[in-house]
């Protein structure tokens, strides 16, 4: 009887070793990549046209490195707010399925919640304070978005922050805006730590490169700006991997 038990256990162990070996040989490091968010994920340019976004450039990089299995930005939409994204997740079963099968999700959300409350023909210290108060109202919604995404997406999530959308209209010292965006970054960092996500701050990137926003009448980056965001994502994601 003992010999039979040993044989039985031996066969079981051998099967497990074989299964693990087959998995190791045939497993792939290619990624199912889902881009969520607003017009930045869509690729709106400074002249009202949809083109390449940071997500497209990032997907191209993954493809070039033979790391891309699937990619879509179809769930991103210009003008999306946190409420819009939460409703999309709740109502769209295909999105839920894709999130469940995802290896990587990038997301930018919340900027439209912030910007729609203000007209940016000028900005003063008082409005900076009001924007900070608005940030405090928005980030519980951002947190809820991340909670909902995390229900389905169990692998890597990269969150992209805000940039100063119209720098040439703001007659303020750098310190005033630095304080506001440092606060935004810190709130994002807290949420990302809570849901085990990576965070990409892009405010310093755009502060150093105002040429990324060439149209005084539009808040969207040009292709160089989108490429730069993509490079920040590449650096952050592969450093964390």
Image: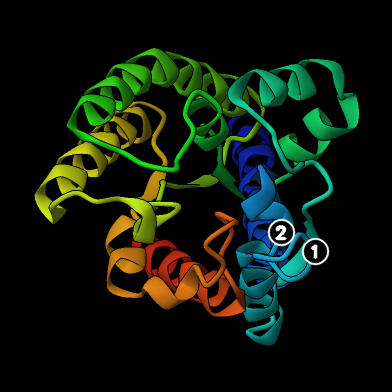
- Residue 152: give x, y in percent of width and height: 67, 28
Front residue of 188 and 30: 188
In the image, taking residue 231 as reference, residue 28 lies left or right, namely right
Residue 18 vertical placement versus 82 (above, below)? below
Query: Does any portion of residue 103 appear in the rendered image?
Result: no
Tell me: residue 26, above or below residue 120: below
Left or right of 114 on screen, residue 6: right
Residue that label 1 marks: 49
Residue 167 occupies quadrant: bottom left
Secondary structure under tag 2 reads: loop
Q: Earlier in the sequence, mark 1 or mark 2?
A: 2
Q: Quadrant of the C terminus?
A: bottom left
Q: What residue is shown at x 65% (from left), y 28% (from top)?
A: 1
Where does residue 46 sit, x and y in percent of width and height? 64, 65
Check disc 1 and report its element: helix, strand or loop. Answer: loop
Could you say which is closer to the camera, residue 38 or residue 125? Answer: 125
Relative side of 46 to 186, left or right: right
**Residue at point 44%, 19% (across, down):** 138
- Quadrant of the rendered image containing residue 89: top right
Q: Are marks 1 and 2 in contact (CB under 8 Å)?
A: yes
Vertical placement of residue 19 versus 30, above or below: above
Image x and y of residue 53, in percent: 67, 65
Image coordinates of residue 36 in percent, x first then y, are 67, 43
Q: CA distance from mark 1 to mark 2?
A: 6 Å
Residue occupied by mark 2: 44
| Residue pictured at 50% horizontal, 23% vertical | 117
Task: Specify the farthest residue to the bottom.
Answer: 64
Q: Is residue 230 visible?
A: yes
In this rendering, position of residue 143 left or right of residue 85: left
Q: How is the image coloured?
A: rainbow
Q: Nearer the viewer, residue 214 or 93?
A: 214
């Amino acid at each position: 009887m003992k010999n039979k038990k040993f044989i039985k256990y031996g066969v079981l162990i051998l099967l497990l070793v074989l299964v693990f070996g087959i998995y190791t040989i045939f497993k792939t490091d290619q990624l199912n990549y889902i881009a969520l968010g607003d017009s930045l994920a869509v690729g709106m340019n400074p002249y009202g046209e949809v083109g390449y976004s940071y997500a497209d450039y990032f997907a191209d990089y993954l493809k070039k490195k033979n790391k891309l299995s699937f990619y879509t930005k179809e769930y991103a939409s210009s003008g999306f707010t946190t409420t819009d994204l939460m409703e999309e997740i709740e109502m769209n079963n295909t999105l839920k399925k894709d999130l469940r099968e995802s290896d990587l999700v990038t997301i930018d959300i919340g900027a439209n919640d912030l910007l729609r409350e203000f007209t940016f023909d000028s900005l003063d210290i008082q409005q900076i304070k009001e924007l900070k108060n608005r940030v405090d109202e928005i980030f519980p919604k951002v947190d809820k978005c991340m909670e909902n995404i995390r229900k389905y997406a169990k692998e890597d999530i990269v969150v992209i922050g805000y940039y100063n959308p119209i720098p040439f209209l703001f007659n303020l010292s750098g310190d005033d805006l630095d304080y506001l965006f440092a606060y935004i970054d810190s709130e994002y960092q807290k949420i990302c730590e809570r849901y085990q996500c990576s965070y990409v701050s892009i405010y310093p990137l755009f502060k150093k490169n105002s040429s990324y926003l060439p149209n005084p009448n539009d808040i969207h980056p040009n292709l160089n700006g989108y490429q730069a965001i993509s490079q920040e994502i590449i650096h952050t994601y592969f450093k964390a991997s």
